[in-house]
Image: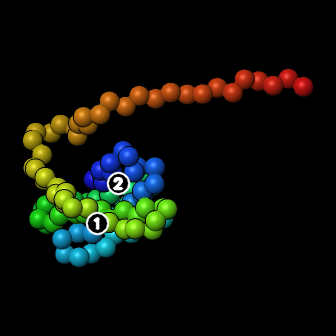
Amino acid sequence: MKCVIPSFVADFVSVVNWEDSEGTLIFTNNNFDGKYVVLPSGELQIRNVSAEDGFKTYKCRTKHRLTGETKLSATAGRLVITEPIGGSAPKFSVELSSSSLARPAVHP
């Protein structure tokens, strides 16, 4: 889930945590094994999704690095959970491409 930050403050604002509708705070940390993970980008990743997760809403809290002001998002996001159809693999709407870099050889 992505926290949408207006472009005019994006350079000064970062996500500090997420909060669900039950009041549970989800903080950024280095534990990538839990149900909830706040990625370095500030996005919230929810693993092992169950039907109960679709009843919760999620808001992000941001902090302005110059003023120290924190704000909880005015709107909340919600997961839309559907049953799988058929036996097809998940499909993603974003096309990913890869690239590689080569470092030129340096001869002494």
| Front one among 27 and 89 | 27
Q: Position of residue 93 (x, y in %)?
A: 24, 34
- 37 relative position to 85: left or right: right
Q: Residue furthest bottom?
A: 23
Q: Residue furthest right?
A: 108
Labels 1 and 2: the sequence-earlier one: 2
Which image quadrant for residue 68?
bottom left
Q: Amino acid at mark 1?
A: Leu
| Residue 59 seen by the camera | yes
Which image quadrant for residue 100?
top right
Quadrant for the C terminus in the image: top right
Q: Amino acid at mark 2?
A: Glu
Task: State if disc 2 and disc 1 touch (CB < 8 Å).
Answer: no
| Residue 35 seen by the camera | no
Q: Position of residue 20 (x, y in %)?
A: 23, 69
| Front one among 44 and 63 | 63
**Image: 88 above or below 5:** above
Disc number for residue 23: none
* Colour scheme in use: rainbow
Q: Position of residue 15 (x, y in %)?
A: 39, 60
At mark 1, the secondary structure is strand
Identified at 13% across, 61% down, the residue is 54
- 105 relative position to 95: left or right: right
Identified at 10% across, 39% down, the residue is 86
| Front one among 53 and 24 | 24
At mark 2, the secondary structure is loop
Disc number for residue 43: 2
Q: How far is mark 1 from mark 2, CA to CA?
A: 15 Å
Q: In this figure, which residue is indicated by the disc labeled 1? A: 72
| Number of other residues with Cα within 10 Å of mark 1, as a class: few under 14, some 14 to 19, many 20 or more | some
- 85 relative position to 98: left or right: left
